[in-house]
Amino acid sequence: MAVASQTVRGALGAPVIQAAPRHDVIVRTTVAPRWAFPTVLLGTDALALTIAVLLVGVGSGVALAYAPLAILCLALSGAYRRRMSLRALDLTPWVIGRLAIPLLLLAPVAIIRTGTTELLTAVLVAVAILLPMRALAFAGLRRARRLGRFLEPALILGAGEIGAELGRDFLEYPEYGVVPVGFLDCVDGNLPAPLLGDVDRLGPLLSQHDEIRRVIVAFGPAQESELVSVLRAAVAYDVEISVVPRFFDNGVAPDGPDTDDVRGIPLYRVRQSALRKPAWVLKRAVDVLIAGTVLVLASPFLLAVAVAVKLSSPGPVFFRQSRVGEGGREILVPKFRTLRVNHDSDTRWSVDDDPRVTNVGRLMRRTSVDELPQLWSVLKGDMSLVGPRPERPVFVKRFNADVWGYGDRHRVPVGLTGWAQVHGLRGDTSITERARFDNQYIEHWSLWRDFVVLLRTLGEVIRNAKSSR
């Protein structure tokens, strides 16, 4: 078959010479809305599960409950993310595992009410219908991509052999749904798309061109630290980020639903749940619910603490200090006063054996009771229950200059407690380690991890209270 060529105008306005794909299909590139691809898969699964419920019988309560629970489990597991590699058989074991979760949740109810026969029948019918329908949906999406639909403009970081090969594969095989609009690197070569500058241009390009949907990190000459900083800035934009794992050709590569295979080259999806708006809406709702409940229930105790602070030494009950919050914005953080009145708290580093600490303040510090007024900051939205602990502006300026990655902590709201703190990094401890733990929390955030941090914090408070008796 002769290979013709055509010109596709990329997302940045630069013409890209594209080899015509196989099957003599002429691509007329159309960038679909971001919700289009997930909606197709969600609609397919919902239709399959609805058919399964109808076949089992709408009178079956467990069957009716199974369908929405199955959709929820699939959605929370990332089944509806935008994928490059659409192979239903590769995902079949993973999908079956997710469809089994509602079975385990509903089994106790089914045993008590009607027995497990109806539930097992519903699950088997759902699997038998959903998997073939997913295969058909994937085939339809691949076909649509070859016709120029559901395509996503992408930037490739790295103009070396791997990056160039990925670019050519995307153009020759549009069923992956990616149109490379340019490369970012400090070297040029035989590339299928324009070289748009060095990797530090990624942020400005994403800011100027919101039609870019993907960033693909291939091997290149950029240093690891430089790439990390660039990608941490990039996750603020609504783009999917995929990375070619180092040494993948030696078997050192992740596998599973977060990995796409492009002509033998694995691309691992970088999880960004902590920075996705839907995730933070859920996190915010949990913050408000827990903080509001604790403030109401603990109000008599907080009043007693306020009286104790007032009687401990002259001065106000509350101490408000300027701290750096999300995005580098300064916020006022309230605490119960633990020191005698002083005027150098904004520039003096806190230590455990500070002679200015009152007797009541020492007890409050050991049990973290002095931090409880910050629940009000959580309600206001200045803080979250869990996140990087806020620091004073003078120290933030110093640490930004001296500690690699410290400024990246401010990508999310600061917290009442944090991943670093439950690992013993509070008070006069290593700032470098704190930054590493905080950034690791951001990049691997989950609601479950927040609950783990809160439970570990509560356990530490209880232990400290017992030891202070």
Image: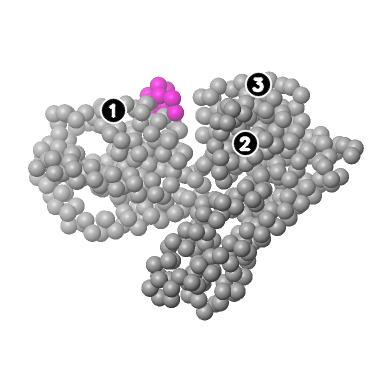
Q: Point out the frontmost of discs 3 and 2.
A: 2
Secondary structure type for disc 1: loop
Q: Is residue 379 above or below residue 120?
A: above
Q: Is 461 left, or right, of 53 in this rendering? A: left
Q: Which label's residue is closer to the chain start, 3 or 2?
A: 3
Q: Going 51% across and 54% down the picture, which residue do you hit?
A: 97
The amino acid at mark 1 is Thr
Q: How many marks?
A: 3
How far apart marks 3 and 1 lie (CA) works out to 39 Å
The amino acid at mark 2 is Pro
Q: Position of residue 157 (x, y in %)?
A: 64, 30
Q: In this orientation, which residue lies closer to the viewer: 32 or 50? A: 50
Which label is found at residue 429? 1
Q: Residues within 10 Å of mark 1 (few under 14, many from 20)?
A: few
Task: State the extent of the magenta-drawn residues as a range.
Answer: 396-405
The amino acid at mark 3 is Cys
Q: Is residue 454 above or below residue 254?
A: below
Which label is found at residue 266? 2
Kindly identify which residue carries mark 3: 186
Secondary structure type for disc 3: loop
